Image (tube, rainbow, N blue to C red):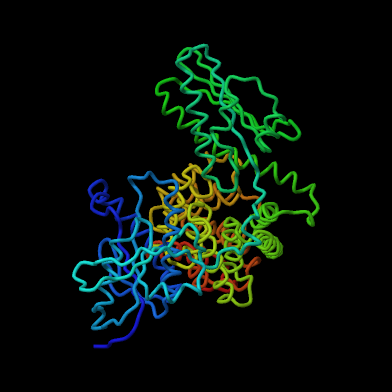
């Protein structure tokens, strides 16, 4: 046995039994996700060591009191942000207690008075709060920017002496590595949008609820998109049943874009029209209409809402790109830099990636608190890492991890942050972690085409390509103007499903194919027995990547099942063996 001084953090989930009774499987899944995404990384970052876990709690040892407190503050502040869009009765929240004392260590467990006190004071902490002993408070009072409230001496169960306790005021505390005062008031110039109440054109007062419900749903769903600033319902509904002047409304609400629409019932059908207006120029950017049979008014409402919120952000971004093309780079704000970096990233070349890195670095420098920019910095660096466009892959990987940690600390509820975390983990062959982040991204924004298409990709890697195809097709329906790469994802899924003709047809939608896509097409033709076509695509692979060989290529794939790797290998071998005998083979 070993005895030493240590800081002990005891954490326990509030309302565990109640949540388990309501939804056992869902509660366990969400708790596990919080552990993987938030708690374990925060503990590791602050040099903590998990000693023991129970179903709803844990004991963690820290050699530094400051590290223990920083970890507790980070966990509770980030959990608060995570719970901001979760109903009160479904929230997973923790109580945390921290004590400093002599601890007895014995065979991967800890004992002693110091542990007992930490466990007891955790029970006295507020839900979502942190309670500490006087020994801890003394150590941090001049070291950390945390508010401390004196609770006086308390009698604890099975502890003979009173213990002086303090409460951390998290609202006034500073999250570790957060912005300093000079950056705290800086905001991102996101495009702002207001959805005006849809007009009921039916002459039927009973349809009023449908028009209002549709408007509210669109506002709610658009608010999930963290790249937009959406004016609240309370502000927009001031203009219900009023004739509006677009520019006046925009100026009063501070909106760059307006969405307006109407609902008309015609017999057994309902028609919804919607348009997006640039408030500055009064120009109509986009308009569409949706005709549906009036079988289930609520199903129609959900369907039309999904269609509108999937299309609108892309239209806004396209309008922003048009403005950006007319803007001198020297005048770019953080949002504009991030937008330009995204455009370059999607082009997928070495030079475009290098330019994208410069722009996204500038976005982060202009606004260090812009979580979306930190996430996209990881994505852009990830593109360089995956394609080998960097000299020191280990150093770049460290930068990717740091950028994602920063993005998560700033905003746990940005679907793009979790989407990019999932993508990075796929490329690092950490498919289990990728699934957690992908599910989180989907729950945050189920109508985001980039999240939906990535669900299809991930299912394909996991050996479920038929389901993957459905998700990729859904993403294409959500965004009819989707990036070309969606066809590449679809082609790979069809190949994994042994649907070679459909795979080839999908790849043929690409205006330009790279060596990876040519290799998949060659494998398709290899399985189909078309020697000439297989040979032609392999020659294009060699022209684009002279050092190509099958084992190295397969090592870049992320299939969870060896049978899927073997399937691709066999297709390439068949294509390879169909080449002229004078051609070099690499099997």
Q: Is residue 562 above or below residue 199?
A: below
Q: Answer left or right for 315 relative to 16.
A: right
Figure disc tally = 0
Residue 505: x, y in percent? Answer: 54, 47
Residue at the image point whose x is 75% and y is 44% from the top: 323
Residue under the image location 63 percent in, 69 percent down: 545
Query: Is 300 in front, or is 94?
Result: 94
> Which of these two is toward me, 326 or 346?
326
Place of residue 240 in the rendered image (x, y in percent of width and height, measured from the top left): 57, 23
Q: Is residue 580 shown above or below 102?
A: above
| Residue 353 in view of the camera | no
The percent coordinates of residue 562 (x first, y second) are 38, 66
The N terminus appears in which quarter of the rendering? bottom left
Q: In this view, does 413 lie above or below 274?
A: below
> Looking at this rendering, what residue extends furthest in the front direction?
152
Residue 368 visible in rendering: yes
The residue lying toward the viewer, choosing from 417 and 100, is 100
Q: In which quarter of the image is residue 29?
A: bottom left
Q: Where is residue 292 in the image (x, y as percent from the top left)?
A: 48, 23
Task: Identify which residue, 528 or 483, lies in the foreground.
Answer: 483
Horizontal arrangement in the rendering, residue 348 relative to residue 302 (left or right)? right
In this rendering, position of residue 104 left or right of residue 271: left
- The residue that appears at 41% across and 70% down in the rendered structure is 43
């Amino acid at each position: 046995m070993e005895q030493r001084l240590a800081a002990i953090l005891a954490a326990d989930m509030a309302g565990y039994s109640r949540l388990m009774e309501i939804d056992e499987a869902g509660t366990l899944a969400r708790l596990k996700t919080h552990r993987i995404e938030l708690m374990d990384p925060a503990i590791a970052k602050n040099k903590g060591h998990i000693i023991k876990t129970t179903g709803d709690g844990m004991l963690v040892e820290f050699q530094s009191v400051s590290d223990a407190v920083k970890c507790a503050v980070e966990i509770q502040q980030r959990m608060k942000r995570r719970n901001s869009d979760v109903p009160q009765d479904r929230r997973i929240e923790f109580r945390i207690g921290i004590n400093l004392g002599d601890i007895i260590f014995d065979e991967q467990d800890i004992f002693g008075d110091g542990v007992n006190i930490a466990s007891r004071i955790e029970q006295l902490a507020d839900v979502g709060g942190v309670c500490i002993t006087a020994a801890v408070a003394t150590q941090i009072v001049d070291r950390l920017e945390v508010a401390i409230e004196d609770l006086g001496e308390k009698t604890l169960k099975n502890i003979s002496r009173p213990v002086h306790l303090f409460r951390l005021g998290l609202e006034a505390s500073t999250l570790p590595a957060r912005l300093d005062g000079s950056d705290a008031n800086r905001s991102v110039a996101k495009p702002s949008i207001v959805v005006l109440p849809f007009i009921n054109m039916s002459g039927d007062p009973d349809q009023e609820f449908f028009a209002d419900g549709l408007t509210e749903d669109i506002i709610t769903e658009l608010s999930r998109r963290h790249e937009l600033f959406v004016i609240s319902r309370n502000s927009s509904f001031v203009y219900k049943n009023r004739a509006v002047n677009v520019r006046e409304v925009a100026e009063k609400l501070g909106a760059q874009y307006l969405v307006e629409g109407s609902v008309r019932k015609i017999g057994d059908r309902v028609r919804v029209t919607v348009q997006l207006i640039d408030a500055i120029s009064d120009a109509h950017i986009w308009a569409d209409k949706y005709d549906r049979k009036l079988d289930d008014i609520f199903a129609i409402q959900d369907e039309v809402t999904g269609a509108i919120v999937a299309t609108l952000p892309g239209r806004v971004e396209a309008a922003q790109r048009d403005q950006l093309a007319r803007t001198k780079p020297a005048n770019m704000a953080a949002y504009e830099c991030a937008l330009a970096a995204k455009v370059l990233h999607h082009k997928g070349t070495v030079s475009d990636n290098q330019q994208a890195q410069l722009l996204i670095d500038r976005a982060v420098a202009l606004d260090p608190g812009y979580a979306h920019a930190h996430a996209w910095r990881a994505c852009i660096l990830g593109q360089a890492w995956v394609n080998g466009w960097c000299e020191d892959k280990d150093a770049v990987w460290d930068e990717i991890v740091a950028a994602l940690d920063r993005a998560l600390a700033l905003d746990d509820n940005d679907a793009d942050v979790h989407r990019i975390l999932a993508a990075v983990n796929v490329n690092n062959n950490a498919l289990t972690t990728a699934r957690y982040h992908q599910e989180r991204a989907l729950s945050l924004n189920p109508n985001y085409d980039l999240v939906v298409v990535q669900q299809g990709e991930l299912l394909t890697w996991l050996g479920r390509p038929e389901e993957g195809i459905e998700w990729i097709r859904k993403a294409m329906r959500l965004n009819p103007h989707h990036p070309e790469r969606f066809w590449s994802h679809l082609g790979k899924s069809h190949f994994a499903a042994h649907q070679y003709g459909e795979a080839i047809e999908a790849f043929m939608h690409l205006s330009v194919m790279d060596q990876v896509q040519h290799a998949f097409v060659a494998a398709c033709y290899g399985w189909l027995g078309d020697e000439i076509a297989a040979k032609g695509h392999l020659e294009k692979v060699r022209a684009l990547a002279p050092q190509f060989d099958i084992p190295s290529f397969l090592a870049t794939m992320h299939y969870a099942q060896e049978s899927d790797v073997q399937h691709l290998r066999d297709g390439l071998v068949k294509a390879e063996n169909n080449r002229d005998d004078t051609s070099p083979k690499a099997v």
